Image (tube, rainbow, N blue to C red):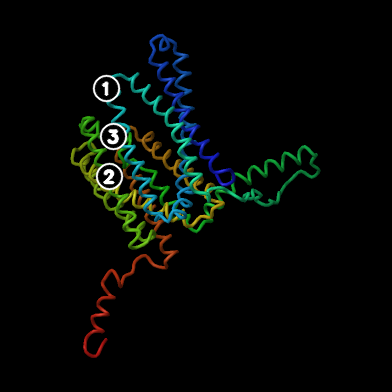
Amino acid sequence: MDRSNRLVAIRHSIVWQRVPVAVSCACFVALLMPSWRESELVVSGLFLAVVLLACMEKLAATANTVAVERDWVIIVSDNLAIERQDLNASMRRIDLFCKLVAPVVISLFDSLSTKVAVWTVLGVNVLCVFIEYIAIAQVYKAIPELLRTATVPTDYGSVAVEDAPEHPTANQQSLIKSAIHLAKRAASPWREYVASPIFLASFALSLLYLTVLSFGTTMVTYLLHTGFDPLQVSCMRIGAVLAELSGTWAAPFIMGRIGPIRSGLWFLNWQLGCLATAALAFALYDSNSRLVAVSLILGVALSRIGLWGFDLSVQFLVQEGVEEDARGRFSSTEMSVQNVFEMLSFATTIVFPRPEQFKYPVFISYGAIALAAICFAAYVRKERGHLLHMSKCWGGDKMRRSYQALPGGL
């Protein structure tokens, strides 16, 4: 993403994101055929193929996100004189809306036939390849600044080697140099990431991925266990997405008033406060209680405003704080950290698999959010020298002006 032609790179991400989904659908169609299902070896092979294709799709989707959200958006907003926070929010709004509509539409097709639903997904993905392939080229041609005119250097310098063999052969020297070069190339993005001035802000956002406090599969399974039916859970998810959408409108407005650093602080603490009731309910009452489930639903739904407001605030800070030739490396490393924390969230439910143990993943998730708040507070303190304008919070400036207006002044 940092070195190659922008259009070529993003077109690769489009193709390798859509084609694996289409091939996966073909595998599912085969699995739905009775003759194929009779062979356990065939079923296992097709299932393995679907998993590997999903991994490929995830990698391509990450590349596409890095290219669009952390590189193209900056150049497009600068050249079209569009407020970057507004463009970020609009794109996130479209993303959330599609995530709301897509499951509903596919569920309608699935109610007719699972095979119809699979063929629909296959057809949509094949069609989208051509639409996105052409549309992204139109954007590229419309913004000449997207064309790279210089080659980004890839030499990361030299590294001293200790404890090398006393008289290595030419082949051994070549292998050692290759190993050192590969290790250096692998470690370099991580060193850059940790050394970045906005590391703490990015790491705080990544910590939020270590959570079961979202309307994902884990929490949905818990809600179904406590007695809610699928229709009720679907309505809850719609309500949560509406809260998320409201966060995408609130974020640019608040960032425009108080800046991305302070808005990030307030949004993250809003999320922490909304989920405090849910964590407290799990601590005081039985996990299977309907009261606990309701407090969890309300807390999570309201916390989504803070989540996406904080996400957009940090995204703006990353766009502003990372140099052009390092955007891909920084954002890819950040997403790697996010995926690690997401895997850890799944690990919490592996360790505590029973519904009555769901409180422990909840406590771990809330602890991760609290740690994120601490990290971001440290970032704010480092950047601004303070967390709050106490005089403004207590109305000190207004009081001072009032006293000065009195006869004799203050």
The amino acid type, in three-letter code, at marker 1 is Ser
Q: Is residue 196 visible?
A: yes
Q: Which residue is mark 3?
A: 220
Instruction: Provide the secondary structure element on which disc 3 rests.
Output: helix
Nearest the eye: 410 or 281? 410
The amino acid type, in three-letter code, at marker 3 is Val
Q: Residue furthest bottom?
A: 408
Residue 300's disc number = 2
Residue 111's disc number = 1
Instruction: Provide the secondary structure element on which disc 2 rests.
Output: helix
Q: Are marks 1 and 3 in contact (CB under 8 Å)?
A: no
Counting other residues with Cα less than 10 Å from the Cα at mark 2, is it few (<14), some (14-19), or many (20 or more)?
many
Quadrant where the N terminus sits is top right
In the rendered image, residue 188, in percent from the top left (x then y), is placed at: 59, 49
Nearest the eye: 328 or 124? 124
Q: Is tag 2's residue or tag 1's residue first in the polypeptide sequence?
A: 1
| Residue 270 placement: quadrant | bottom left
Counting other residues with Cα less than 10 Å from the Cα at mark 3, is it few (<14), some (14-19), or many (20 or more)?
some
Question: Compared to 216, does 33 lie above or below?
Answer: above
The amino acid type, in three-letter code, at marker 2 is Val
Mark 3–mark 2 distance (CA, rounded to whole Å)? 12 Å
Question: Compared to 393, does 81 lie above or below?
Answer: above
Q: Are marks 2 and 1 in contact (CB under 8 Å)?
A: no
- Observer-side mark, 1 or 3, equals 1
Mark 1–mark 3 distance (CA, rounded to whole Å)? 20 Å
Counting other residues with Cα less than 10 Å from the Cα at mark 1, is it few (<14), some (14-19), or many (20 or more)?
few
In the rendered image, residue 274, in percent from the top left (x then y), is placed at: 26, 50
Mark 2–mark 1 distance (CA, rounded to whole Å)? 29 Å
Question: Compared to 247, does 356 lie above or below?
Answer: above
Q: Looking at the image, which residue is at 35% across and 45% down?
A: 365
- Viewed as shown, does residue 379 lie left or right of 271? right
Instruction: Provide the secondary structure element on which disc 1 rests.
Output: helix
